[in-house]
Image (tube, coloured by chain):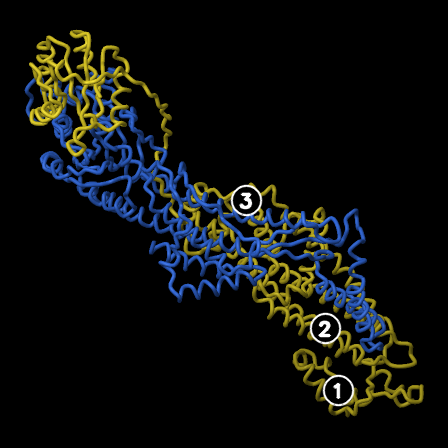
Amino acid sequence: MKDIPRFAVVGHPNKGKSSIVSALAQDDSVQISDIPGTTKKIRVFPLKVDNRVIYELIDTPGFQRARSVLSYINKEGLSAHEKFERINKFINENRNNPKFNDEIELLEPIMQGAGIIYVVDGSKPYGLEYEPQMEILRYTGRASMALINMIGDEDYSILWKNALNQYFKIVKTYNPLKAKFSDNIELLEAVSYLNEKWTKEVKDSILILKANHEGKIETTALVIAQNIVNSITLTQKIHLKGKEATKKEKELLKQQYKNKLISLELKTQKDIEKLWHHNILQIEQDELNILDNSLFSKQSQSIFGLSKNLLFLTGLTSGGLAGAGVDMAVGGSSLMAGSIIGAAIGGTGAVFGYDKLADIKILGQKIGKKELKIGPVKNINFPYILLNRSLLYAKIIINRSHALREKEFLKSNENISEQFIDSKTRKKLEKLHIKFRKSSEVKHQDIEDYKLIILDILKMI
Amino acid sequence: MSHNSRLKNYIDYICLLKYQELDKEKNRLDGIKLKHLKAFPLKQLKAWSTLHSPSTNQSNSANIIKGINTVTVILIFIIFLAGLSVGYGLISYSGQEPINIFHFLFVGVLFPLFTLFLNIIAMVKNKSVHSEFLLKISPAYWLDKLLETFPSFRINFIFEPLILNWLILNRIQLLTISFLSGILISLIAIVISKDLAFGWSSTLSISPKELYDFFQIVSLPWDWLCHCGSPSLELIQKSQFFRLGGKLSKEYISHAQLLGNWWQFLAFAIIFWGIFSRVVLLFITKYFLNRAIDKSYLQNEKSKALLHNLNTQIVKTQADTKENVLSKNNNFINTKDIDSSDISTVIGWNIDKNRLDIVLDYQNIKPKFTFLAGGNNTLEEDNKILHSIKEEPTIIIKSWEPPTDEFLDFIEELSRKTKKIDILPIGTSHNSYIPAEKDIKIWHNKLKKFQNIWMLP
């Protein structure tokens, strides 16, 4: 079996190992807690492409009894090349010893060949208690790097670097709570140089992750485009009981319409969250506000689903066809009079008998239906409102680190669209908005064009 | 592949998309099997449909095709009968007046040519799915509208309008062929069983020569095959008749044998201009129907999503296993105020000497004994410290570094020697050595099992 790159994230308890893993693996299911010792068992985060593992990140418990382990290793005054085996011996002897559970968990993957990513808190002063840990890791002989995690506001990174450079091949600063995708890629670039036999796999994985990221942005643009199109073309109708719509029916329809718009937006947001693997995110935002004066309702009637005009056309055509049959039967000697008379009877009958026809029942169902229809929203700014909200939301989601656990607050009054939509883009958008409102069926190509505009904006964000 | 089987496969495919939720992982597994077709999306979709065809029980494609074919056959039969009767009507010969070939040509050739022309216009307009003109006059559109009113009658599959229109255009050719075949068979049957006299008569001033020239052009397609299929000048000259007088002229009757010869021209006219042209159109509409079916595969919204799933790698970075949710506990150990004068033994845990001196100075603590434990001490060094402790110690700890098990071991050992242990947490110099509240809480939680520990504020 091919040796895949594996990296164990190790260090003192509560120094952000799990946050780093959560950010790199884009997994917000990782337990991140102020309580040290949250991680008791290793957890593996593989990068899989079509179920094929490319590399593995391993979250480990923190060192709890590093000096005891170091004491064991140094007991017999062994030389450097013997210390490696001594660690293996320690693991074998203490595998079932609960006292060293955490040490066994973190050392085993390293002894099986995993590279080391050692995490420290650069916002706190350097401490002597870290040296036993770093000694143990040095004795494993594995490729290693140190990450200075800036958890707090203070900065002691220079002191840390002075110490860490003595033990680790690469020392980098990284903040998992603020890290964006580009920061994670930069970190992986550094990791790729830990061991030259893994460089190609890790670099290939970077390309895969980048392509995946691009793909997700494109899908986000499509989801937003689809939602806006659905919202600005949305109509709702209710069947009327009486001949005219009552005030209650009108209000009911308006509320139904607003609720539907809100639910469309919420669904879009959930889809985007799911796409970016934010499963526990909480966002506080203002609800979509649709002014009553943007909504217009219209009463209509139909027979067989046909409006008056369509029924006239149908009557005309079918009457004409029936008359043509008569013309053919008499060998044409009627000189198409049958078709003309048939068309006239069919057409006028449909127009004048429309209302009476509506009340006729066939198989228990009235062939005519009265309904009240509402929408689409006439306000020309409505699509821009939706677009702004969607872009704000997408910006938060795309850039949010999976290590964050705090609630997000969406400021709906922030006009992100203005920053990124120039007059040329606005003209293109307006053209499309008009097309969407006018068409009975939106063309795929138009949605595609709309998606591309949104994609360009998202890339800038 | 016949368009019936192509249509069946299409129906199966659409039903698969309709009844199955697209599963990214399952689709990707299929995509890996079909990766050689990545550059041919249509073939890939069809191959995917074939892969899943055993599970198309919910597809009533066979029933739909059967229904379409049944309706077509019934209509062909009815229209054939209509053709037979129209043909019989057209060449009903009473013996009083000859059969005017113009009547026959009008119904049997010209009218079908006119409808052929309309069909061609419909085909030209039918180039896109969203051709609203054709849709609104298409019988498929009205049928759909009608069925919307009676949902219980809706079949469980709705064709794309483009496909339906091409299908109808295709079937219209069959029906027309059937109608014209009826007329042709009527003609031949009556020619065989009765004596017929054909003639031509018109108000227009058409000379026999002009008519002859015209019919030469009309019969050009079959003249090389059968010269008897094109009327001679003599036949045209001798078969003109006039209705004035009410009786046929004796001269006309003398050519009775000759007058029947028109039947070959009429038969060939129907065969070529009627039936053959419709056969050509039948193949053309079949071709476009197949194209429409193929186009519909790709234009379907779900098809795009399916192609995306088939051809996009699934990249996963999340853990396969779930983590157990931790419960939070808030435990507090005893606290008391600092009494600097009361502190005689101080142990700095994980603290270097310089920092310890600064803290002691800051807190105005002047202990008799000072020890440095933890840090990079060996365990033996810490054990020596434990043995040296005579009085109740105050352990100064870095509040931001949570206690490890090593510290708890140390406290446990120390507890055997002293009744009480005080813990003095300190913060960083940046915060004037004041510890953060959240850090203190962690220490309280970790030390909860010890009854003899007191936390100094």
Residue B348: mark in rendering: none
Q: Quadrant of the N terminus of chain B?
A: bottom right
Which residue does the image show at 37% across and 26% down from the upper left? Answer: B325
Q: CA distance from mark 1 to mark 3?
A: 61 Å
Q: CA distance from mark 3 to mark 2?
A: 42 Å
Q: Looking at the picture, does residue B257 appear above or below residue A158?
A: below
Q: Looking at the picture, does residue B49 appear above or below residue B339?
A: below
Label 3 environment density (alpha carbons within 10 Å; few <14, some 14–19, many ≥20): some
Q: Name the residue at the right extreme.
A: B246
- Host chain of mark 2: B
- Residue B375 at least partly seen: yes
Mark 2 element type: helix
Mark 3 element type: helix
Q: Nearer the viewer, residue A432 or A84?
A: A432
Residue B232: mark in rendering: 1
Which residue does the image show at 52% across and 57% down from the upper left? Answer: B299
Q: Are marks 3 and 2 on the same chain?
A: yes
Disc nearer the start of the sequence (1/3)? 3
Disc nearer the start of the sequence (2/1)? 2
- Host chain of mark 1: B
Q: Looking at the picture, does residue B134 appear above or below residue B62?
A: below
Amino acid type, callout 1: Ser
Q: Kindly identify which residue carries mark 2.
A: B112
Amino acid type, callout 3: Ser
Chain letter of the yellow region: B
Disc nearer the start of the sequence (3/2)? 3
Chain letter of the blue region: A
Q: Nearer the viewer, residue A117 or A404?
A: A404
Q: Kindly identify which residue carries mark 3.
A: B53
